[in-house]
Image (cartoon, rainbow, N blue to C red):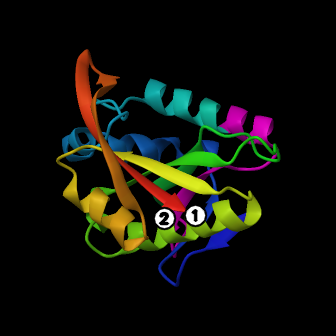
Amino acid sequence: MRLVVNDQVHLSEVRASDKGALVAHLNDRDIYERTLRIPFSYTEAHADEWLALVARNTEQQGRPVQWAVRSADDALIGACGLNGFQADKSQSHRAEVGYWLAKPFWGRGIMTAVVRRVCRHAFEDFGLAKLIAHVSPHNLASARVLEKCGFQEEGFLRQHFLKDGRFLDARLFGLLR
């Protein structure tokens, strides 16, 4: 499966061969500090766990719900996915969007285009009515991505995530179809 975003990037299924790129890109303290779930140091074991999770989710959902963000030359430069819903189930109306982008690609509008494309896919192909996203309070760039995609801030969640033994606050954003 391939979802075209623009002439710079596309989305495809995550591959086992992406492991090296995952470790190389996510072993970055700046990504760690701006995300609510990605560990640091990011190891091959972390990559293996995530690749297994993506494979399980794809099997359970019957189709991909997490995608690799790839450059024009098909290199992995990030990821974007949907969590917290069951595809093809009428009671599932909402999902959470999560994403990351390798640092050399920041500031180019890539993630805004990717999130916009994933949201369209979620509404049109999965029939979802609402998307949510959690953002670290100090990750202003991620909040701006969501705002450019039409998300509105819906709340501030105190001590909502636990990462490396610390409680983290989160800003909650929502987008209605």
Instruction: Determine contact: label 2, label 1, CB under 8 Å.
Output: yes
Q: Which mark is residue 115?
A: 2
Label 1 is placed on what type of residue?
Answer: Val
Q: Is residue 78 left or right of residue 30?
A: right
- Counting from the top left corner in percent of width and height, residue 108 is at 30, 76
Give the labeled residue for mark 1. Answer: 118
* Residue 3 vertical position relative to residue 45 in the rendered view, above or below: below
Residue 43 among those drawn in magenta: no
* Disc 2 element: helix
Q: Residue at x 38, y 63 (%)?
A: 146
Q: Is residue 117 left or right of residue 35?
A: right
Identify the image quadrant of the N terminus.
Answer: bottom right
Indicate the quadrant where residue 103 lies: bottom left
Give the residues in magenta. Answer: 55-74
Q: Which mark is residue 35?
A: none
Residue 58 among those drawn in magenta: yes
* Residue 1 vertical position relative to residue 155 in the rendered view, above or below: below
